Amino acid sequence: MRVPNHIGIIPDGNRRWAVNNGLSKEQGYGPGLKPGLELFKICKELGVNELTYYGFTTDNTKRPAVQTKAFTLACIDAVKMLSKEDASLLVVGNTKSPMFPKELLPFTERKTFGKGTMKINFLVNYGWEWDLSDVLDLETTNRKHIVNSLKSSDISRVDLIIRWGGRRRLSGFLPVQSVYSDFYIIDDYWPDFKPSHVYKALQWYDEQDITLGG
Amino acid sequence: MRVPNHIGIIPDGNRRWAVNNGLSKEQGYGPGLKPGLELFKICKELGVNELTYYGFTTDNTKRPAVQTKAFTLACIDAVKMLSKEDASLLVVGNTKSPMFPKELLPFTERKTFGKGTMKINFLVNYGWEWDLSDVLDLETTNRKHIVNSLKSSDISRVDLIIRWGGRRRLSGFLPVQSVYSDFYIIDDYWPDFKPSHVYKALQWYDEQDITLGG
């Protein structure tokens, strides 16, 4: 099986899951932690080299405070959890905004944990416009120059994006690294993660031809 | 029904259609013209305000010359065909490359034809890296400034992208205007276009909640 080098994870549906389970919306984020670790372990075993988790965005921070607090806490916990694994870990996001949690500042330079087997990027207070805001007027259409000017320049091209929660859109996820990505949508909500979701996504990816736009 | 303001069209599968019909690959482009007009007429009737057709990309120009000639000719014919409709028409692409057909140079400034009812953008020799190459170092994350720095700045945010040919990816299509777009994939190849494709896509779009990342 052809395993993607880099998988982007959009773990959506936490609030809808909470409401369906008789909880308040903000209670949907905590139950997303265990799936994140399970997914990491499956990808590590399969030989995936890089994983990017879509934590929260600058768009998301416009939600009610009780929700922003809950998803921020879940992201802090998730990054700490992943730092106990074999990972080369980097948090990417706008640190100049007050919405960026100071607990994660030490992770904004890539650090190796354990054997550092997998490159993990975790987007926290990420905004596509923030990401693009330093793309210089390079008088060039050279891809490397453009990619190197991104705030997220340490994140590679994404081969496969898996989105939970049924929505068929990027919602601002890494617009430049995603230009050639294949999208796989899972209707189940993220807290209802099952290993079979990943296996099915990878099986589907294996059947796609990769042309990089050619 | 909530009709999208702006629909992006990725008319893929011409070559696979040709091969399936016992033709050589380059013969798959011509039969894509009629569907393009049919789609325009349906969208006009439904009250869609803006349509963007993905003609060909700088990536595509790396294909064998017999194919690049065929898809370039099909794009020239398509633009001329649309200029006979009620359309405010603009061709967007890298005119500085020899792959840009000189026949379409007059269309690189927006022109009104007939009643100019619909805004139509046609991407010809378009490259995502070309599009982003002028995004200035604005020391800002202001969306308007970024969007105005795009080569494709005259093209609005895309609400719905419909892709024919079964592939689930953007292939470099307007990365900035697509950050919040909903994707609808049709397995049939583009020359096998049916009006029901569009109606189903719009029905599906009507069921999506629009959050713009929020």
Image: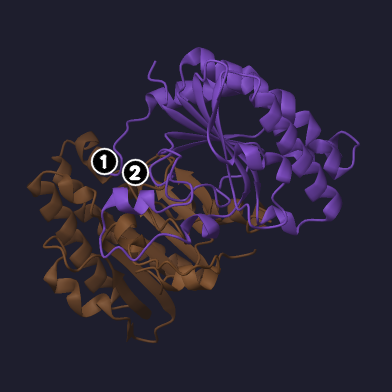
Chain colours: A purple, B brown
Residue at image location 72% in from the left, 54% down from the top: A99
Letter of the chain that mark 2 sits on in the rendering: B
Residue B41 percent coordinates (x, y): 41, 69
Q: In this figure, what is the number of numbered marks? A: 2
Do the CB atoms of the residues marked 1 and 2 lie less than 8 Å apart? Answer: yes
**SS for dot 2:** loop
Is the residue marked by circle 1 packed among few (<14), some (14-19), or many (20+) residues within 10 Å? many
Residue at image location 73% in from the left, 36% down from the top: A76
Q: Are marks 1 and 2 on the same chain?
A: yes
Residue B182 percent coordinates (x, y): 55, 52
Residue linked to disc 1: B17
Query: What's the residue type where badge 2 is placed?
Result: Tyr
Where residue A97 sits, quadrant-wise, is bottom right
Can you say which quadrant of the picture contains the N terminus of chain B?
bottom right
Residue linked to disc 2: B189
Q: CA distance from mark 1 to mark 2?
A: 6 Å
Q: Which mark is residue A145?
A: none
Can you say which quadrant of the picture contains the C terminus of chain B?
bottom right
